[in-house]
Amino acid sequence: MLRNYFKIAVRTLISNPFYSFISILGLVLGMSCSLVIGLWAFQEGSFNDFFPEGDRIYKVRINYLFNGELMTNTLTPAPLAEALKSEVPPVEYAAVYADWGPRLLIKDNNNSIRENGIFASDDFFNIFPVEVIAGNPVKAHGSSDQVVISRSAADRLFNGLPAIGENLMMEDVEGKLKTYVVGAVIEDIPVNSSIKFDWVINFREIEQSWMGWGNTSYYTWVKARPHTAIEDLESSAKAVYPKYSDFKDNYPVFQPLADVHLYEVFENGKAVGGRITLVRNLLLIGFLTLLVSCINFVSLVTARASARGKEIGIRKVIGADKRTLFTQFGSESMLIATLSLFITVIATVTLALPLFNAYLGTQLALDWGSYGFWGLLAAIWILATIMSSLYPSFFLAGLPVFNALKQQVKPGLSGVYFRKGLIVCQFCITALFIAGILVVYSQQEYVRQKDLGLDRENVLYLSLEGELYHNLEVLRQEVLKSPSVVSATVATHLPINIQAYSGDLAWPGKDPGLQTKISATWVGYDYTKTMGISLAAGREFSPLHLGDSTAYLVNQAALDMIGLEEDPIGAEISFWNGSGPIVGVMEDFHLQSLHSPITPLILVLEPENASYLLVRSAEGQLEQAIADLRQVTETINPEYPFEYHFLDQEYERLYLSERMISRLILVFGIVAIVISCLGLLGLTAFTVSRRVKEIGIRKVLGASVLEITTLLARSYLSLILLGWLIALPVSSMVLNGWLANFAYKIELTWWYFASAGFITLVIALLTVSFQSIRAALTNPVESLRSE
């Protein structure tokens, strides 16, 4: 029986190629989008699951009170790991590590690479076992003179030759090159890891006396003993801070390894969200795209019910009941869904995934051996089959026998209203996507064009390494000799992403109970000039003023926090370099991305602590400035390769997540529009085919092409407008929620939603008009002769 059903289904597909093509294409587009998003979400959810005994691994964060509010810090003090291991019995291993960004690994003068790595304490590889290529990483890591490197780093440095026992040089904390022996080579860390590195050196290499309990700049991880509950860990760890530090109210909290990637946002000491929000939103986009494709299929099937009326009537007369007919039509839908899924997999492998990876910079792939992949395929197939088959099967199986045999199938008001409801739903989703595209794109443009309070154009920077670090002022003065360079300075942090904070600020009259949190960075001379930061009062640091070593520059937000409203220049404050005057007040500028509000900032003159040289080139002379900078750095620092970056490109990297969202909404919005247009095209074509005689008679009686087109389009316009009206409050709520992630954002005005409705209407009109005009231009003689 099932074999017979599938034969009929195949014949039906072949006999109606136009409608079959539209139905299958719509499902393929929807399934492809769902599959790609599902693969990405699956990768996000699989972060860190490759580590053995991952259920025993926890990331340590610190809860603390700040002016009465419970806050959580991801970074921890360096001594915490050892204290947890010695004071908390459920902790078997504890490790601290520092991630100071990419470092240069030098094999010789002709062979060096810059890779990310970490300085980790002894227990690191006991907590995170890795696949070993050569050597013993646990033993090698115990030595301060050995380095553990990844397979890809070994291949690039040693060209496939054995790396064990070879020497590599890296800059130490004093800025001098130190030689390390390669003690182990490990397999590359997978992309779905929260901890990424290509080399590991023991934490003792950077450990210094000032790394106490007040310096929270490091990451701490623990591995609990078997069968340890997280409550036992946290209750045992509460006594650590009171015993070892002056921060009696602080206490560690432990986050399971499986939650680290998706739940990085904490409120009131608890994980409340983070990247999981992005995953959920994109899964919703994938579901809506699949839903639109299924609605497209259902609309076409129910609209064309009359074409199969005689077949259904005959089957009922010879004894077929509703269950038999339901099985038959369900089998047809299942066949179409299966065929669509097969095409989807081929299209995803050959087209969708390569484009997705290139467009978004991801590394997705189909893992044929993964149960998760097959589960995802099964979920999409089941979801598509159920959504596209249930109602059409019930509907077709329930058609009345008498009308079916007369081929005058009228589904009744309920069937008509249901199909109209599907069209409304379809274009409601389309309007949602269009509104999302407009708003997200506008916010991206706002971010790109917003005045940050500094000028990031024509600014390049390079890391201070080797002799560059030891000859800062010589380097700066040599660079300034270039006529293509306007100014140059040094700084510890890039001005667009200052992540260092301090609570050390004090001033006369400060409330002893008031806790302060101020952004701070060390800088050199000409900082505000180089960065294009305006001064509201005073001056910037100058070599002509010897007392500037204990002076400070602050921004307007810092003045507001201190409470200095008048005559701030010369006011005494106390910070890292002791008590000193405020010599300059900067206009507020954005220290981080626009997700965060502008915070109080203090600049300290201490060039020897700088990490970057920042250079502003003259307008139109960037290439010459780069060439001159290369010549200077290669003369001073010949052992290091010349590497530079642009500040505006670094700013763009602050918004990678938003760029991903905007691109995905654009792509899937276009897909949803195409699917909706395919469905509307099919419905219009079918409507025209049922009204051929009517159109012919109207033309004979004098109806114009415009009147006939209006007649056919009118029934759809009200449904599209209704869909847009339903989308208004939904899109407003969703987009306001997304914009709430930005401290600085566009205003969500009425024109975004009006434009979404107008664009939806225009697209629908063009689709309907294509078939309507074609029908209206048909010779009425041909239309009437068909009877």
Image (cartoon, helix red, strand yellow):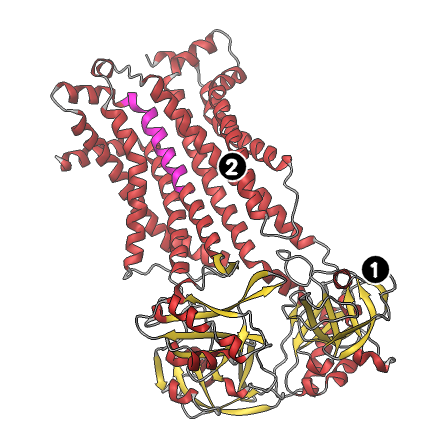
Viewer-nearest residue: 348 or 263 = 263
Q: In the structure shown, which secondary structural element does the residue marked by tag 1 occupy?
A: loop
Q: Nearer the viewer, residue 107 or 143?
A: 143
Relative image position of residue 497 (x, y in whole percent): 64, 66
Q: Is residue 633 left or right of residue 4?
A: right
Viewer-proximal residue, 248 or 197?
248
Pointer 1 local density, CA inside 10 Å: few below 14, some 14–19, many at least 20:
few
Query: From this viewpoint, is residue 485 visible?
Result: no
Residue 117 percent location from the top left of the image: 50, 78
Q: For mark 1, what is the residue?
A: 565
Question: Of callouts 1 and 2, which one flags the residue occurring earlier in the amino acid sequence?
Answer: 1
Residue stretch in magenta: 289-307
Which secondary structure type mostly characterizes the magenta part of the structure?
helix
Secondary structure type for disc 2 = helix
Q: Residues within 10 Å of mark 2 (few under 14, many from 20)?
A: some
Indicate yes or no whether the magenta region holds residue 607: no
Q: For the image shown, how many numbered marks are present on the structure?
A: 2
What kind of residue is marked 1? Glu
Residue 232: % across, % down: 38, 69
Report how far apart the C-alphas of labels 1 and 2 lie in the structure.
Answer: 45 Å
Q: Residue at x 35, y 29 (%)?
A: 300
Residue 56: quarter of image: bottom left
* Residue hosting label 2: 730
The quadrant of the image that shows the N terminus is top left
